[in-house]
């Protein structure tokens, strides 16, 4: 399944993907044991192993070359102490979902003292006038602190 919807590259309006890893763009190939190989392909998020999907340091993306999901950066087995956000609207909701893990919206919201719908809004990126206050309460439950990296010399 390509892009989560299509059965073949032609149906998805895509060119056929490269047959050899050497011909594929960087987003679709990697180097393992000194050889260029295709990245592992997943048809949906549910195919990604639970141990990867649940780890906050793991990211995945839809490949523009082959139409499948690939694992991006991951630091499995190491404790993540700092995370940079490239796109706050995309990266923050992803982090919140991963921090919640297998807990339900209701369970986390109860501990944070907020309504479950407010947590769901944070995780989907929906704006709300109480958003920052809610985010602060949720991050306190997860024992996570926000920080910024200031440019040197300012």
Image (cartoon, helix red, strand yellow):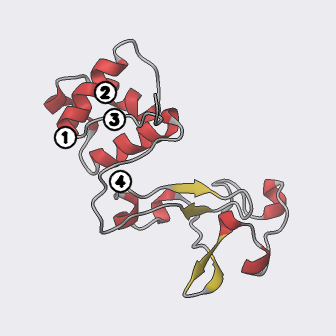
Marks 4 and 2, Cα distance to the nearest angstrom?
A: 17 Å
Mark 4–mark 1 Cα distance, whole angstroms, equals: 14 Å
Q: Is residue 112 left or right of residue 64?
A: left
Q: Is residue 131 visible?
A: yes
Q: Is 134 positioned to the left or the right of 19 in the image?
A: left
Q: Mark number for residue 143? A: 1
Mark closer to the chain start, 3 or 4 = 4
Residue drawn at (35%, 67%), measured in percent from left and top?
76
Q: Secondary structure at mark 2?
A: helix
Instruction: State the image coordinates of residue 29 (x, y, percent, origin top left).
Output: 66, 72
- Mark closer to the observer (3, 4): 3
**Camera-nearest label, 2 or 3:** 3
- State the residue at coordinates (74%, 62%): 65
Quarter of the image with the N terminus in it: bottom right
Task: Compute the Cα span from label 1 to label 3.
Answer: 13 Å
* Along the viewing direction, whichever of 67 and 12 lies nearer the viewer: 67
- Provide residue 66's location: percent of width, then percent of height: 72, 64
Residue 88 sits above or below residue 95 on the image: above
Q: Earlier in the sequence, mark 1 or mark 2?
A: 2
| Measured Cα–Cα span from mark 2 to mark 3 | 14 Å
Q: What residue sits right under mark 2 in the picture?
A: 135
Where is mark 4, residue-wise?
A: 56
Extreme-front residue of the structure: 153
Mark 1 closeness class: few <14, some 14–19, many ≥20 residues within 10 Å: few
Q: Verify CB contact (< 8 Å) between mark 3 and mark 4.
A: no
Marked residue nearer the N-terminal end (4 or 2):
4
At horizontal 16% and vertical 24% (from top left) the residue drawn is 113
- Where does residue 129 sit, x and y in percent of width and height? 39, 12
């Amino acid at each position: 399944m390509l892009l989560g919807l299509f059965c073949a590259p032609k149906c998805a309006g895509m060119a056929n993907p490269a047959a050899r890893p050497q011909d594929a763009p960087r987003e679709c190939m990697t180097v393992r044991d000194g050889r260029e190989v295709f990245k592992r392909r997943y048809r949906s998020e549910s195919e990604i192993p639970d141990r990867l999907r649940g780890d906050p340091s793991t990211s995945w993306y839809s490949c523009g070359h082959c139409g499948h999901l690939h694992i991006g950066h991951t630091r499995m087995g190491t404790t993540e102490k700092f995370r940079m956000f490239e796109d706050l609207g995309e990266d923050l909701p992803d982090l919140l979902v991963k921090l919640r893990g297998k807990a339900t919206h209701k369970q986390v919201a109860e501990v944070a003292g907020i309504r479950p719908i407010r947590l769901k809004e944070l995780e989907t990126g929906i704006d709300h006038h109480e958003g920052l206050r809610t985010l602060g309460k949720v991050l306190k439950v997860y024992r996570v602190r926000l920080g910024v990296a200031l440019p040197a010399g300012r």
